[in-house]
Image (cartoon, helix red, strand yellow):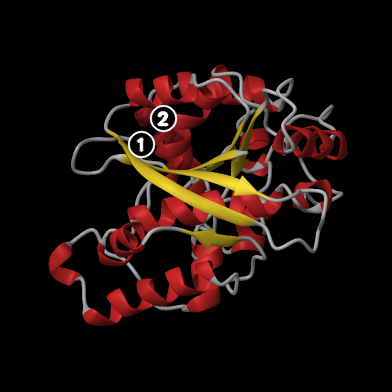
Amino acid sequence: MKVYGIDFSSAPSKKKPIMVAECWLRGSVLESCSNNELSLSRFHSIESLDLFEEFLSQRGPWIGGFDLPFSMPRDLIEYFGWPSRWDIFTRFYCSLDKEVIKNFFIKWCSTKNYGEKFAYRSTDRASKSSPAMRWVNPPVAWMTHAGIERIRKAGLIFPAHQKNFNPMQEQKNINRSMMGDCNFNSRLAFEVYPALTARVVSTKSYKNDDKNKDSSVRVMIRKNIVKYLRYGKAGMSTKLKSSLELQNRMIMDCKGDYLDAAICALQAAEVIKMKNFGLPKNLDPLEGWIALS
């Protein structure tokens, strides 16, 4: 089964592209204790949103782990009377000008006490990620604005947002496809967060966009993260298999784009083996869920 890890950028360019790790998952997704192996084939740099749409148009079957929020907090959505059905909300949200959205967010924050400015999804708190509505440092709200409607319009399946989705049946279909059945062509999209896995190895910073701020300590942390991924010791049973060249690329990239993309793919590969794809029973399909939270 082909698995992609997508380290997303809201304004991709040659300097800061969307980084994609292309991988192949071996084994069976029906055996929860199986030692599956994810083989990293190559990295792709996507330097525009038009090229990102072209990437999304690829035929299935494949699984994608996308590092961007798929939605906003329910409290925020209901406060402003925005559509509360997820697919309608994404279309509405992405149709708004960013300056308009920013003004909505500032209005929300102005009504809150210090330290309680942002609204959080349940999954933001569970994963200790930045709130999905944050528009600076990091601007994840703009990642949602640039990416989610493009992904949805490409026809991908969103297990955390589609009420009629059957994870058990989908696992069986994925397994049949991995065993050689060519009748399965679904494309599944999971929201992922690389820091969840990186923190298992180290709570210290492992990347910086400024090459001058890279250090031997950060290089060593990235090297340890890659080592843990290879041996299945980063909180996931799925092991990452890659060439020395690709390992070195992940280790020496100060921005962490290559490493994050590989982690995104691993998290997507790991979650499809889990019961109900790791989604909680009380899941709110409007907010969605970050894999492995």
* Quadrant where the N terminus is found in the figure: top right
Tell me the number on the disc at residue 269: none
Calculate the distance from the C-alpha at mark 2 to the C-alpha at mark 1.
Answer: 5 Å
Whether label 2 touches label 1, CB < 8 Å: yes
The image shows a total of numbered marks equal to 2
Q: 136 or 56, which is in the foreground?
A: 56
Q: Position of residue 246 (x, y in %)?
A: 34, 57
One can see residue 288 in this view: yes
Name the residue located 50 percent from the left edge and 77 percent from the top edge: 201
Question: Quick one: which residue is furthest to the bottom in this view?
Answer: 217
- On residue 10, the disc is 1
Residue 55 lies in quadrant: top left
Which amino acid does the dot numbered 2 rest on? Ala
62 with respect to 50 (left or right): right
Residue 207 point in image, percent of width and height = 31, 66
Q: Residue at x 37, y 29 (%)?
A: 98
Residue drawn 37% across the image and 77% down it = 221
Q: Which mark is residue 146?
A: 2
Label 2: which secondary element: helix
Instruction: Specify the amino acid type for callout 1.
Output: Ser
Find residue 257 and report its horizontal and vertical position in percent. Answer: 34, 53
First-in-chain label (2 vs 1): 1
Q: Residues within 10 Å of mark 1 (few under 14, many from 20)?
A: many
10 over 232 or under it: above or below: above
Left or right: 134, with 217 as reference point: right
Q: Position of residue 87 (x, y in %)?
A: 65, 23
